[in-house]
Image: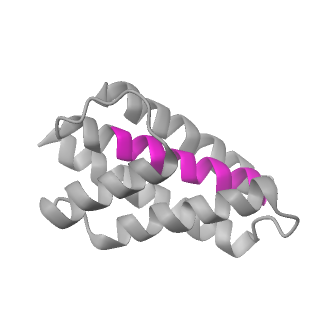
Amino acid sequence: MVAVALERAKEFLAVAEVALERECYNGCASNAYYAMFWAAIAALAHQGFKQTEWSHGGLRETFSRELIVKRHIYPPKFGEWLKDGYNLRTNAHYRLQGASAKGSRRMLEHAREFITKVEEVVKR
């Protein structure tokens, strides 16, 4: 499950990168968030959480509580990034304002760092 979730995270990351190159900021923001979402699933699975379906809020809450606060495996900024990513994705999908170029670039950078760190932890 860890490997499958990480591959899904990387796929969403690749799509986010292409979207940014094409100045499709809503697509970039959305896919960067989903890259972090799937990386968080991989991180939780690696720590023994075998849930096969997650709500956005449930994943964010469990990741933050268990892997940031209790176990100190990931930095607190990762919990913030999941929250910010969800909000930016919501703007991209459902609000007229959409996602900005700056916000999309930042979310993509966060997704890259998030996935890199999860990969490092699961390889230990």
Q: Is residue 72 visible?
A: no
If the image is split into quadrants, where does the N terminus sit? top left
Of residues 113 and 91, the one drawn nearer to the viewer in this rendering: 91
| Range of magenta residues | 25-41
Q: Residue at x 45, y 56 (%)?
A: 112
Magenta stretch holds residue 33 = yes
Where residue 119 sits, quadrant-wise, is top left
Q: Residue furthest right?
A: 96
| Rendered position, 25 above or below 75 | above
Label tally: 0
Pinpoint residue 71: horizontal percent, then vertical percent: 12, 59
Pinpoint residue 55: horizontal percent, then vertical percent: 49, 43
Colouring used for the render? one colour
Magenta stretch holds residue 31 = yes
| Rendered position, 83 above or below 67 | below
Pinpoint residue 12: horizontal percent, then vertical percent: 57, 40
Where residue 53 sits, quadrant-wise, is top left
Of residues 45 and 4, the one drawn nearer to the viewer in this rendering: 45
Q: Residue at x 56, y 62 (%)?
A: 85
Direction from residue 26 to residue 37 in the image, left or right: left
Q: From the image, give the main secondary structure of the stretch colored magenta.
A: helix
Q: Residue at x 26, y 29 (%)?
A: 50
Where residue 114 sits, quadrant-wise, is bottom left
If the image is split into quadrants, where does the C terminus sit? top left
Q: Is residue 99 visible?
A: yes
Pinpoint residue 122: horizontal percent, then vertical percent: 20, 41
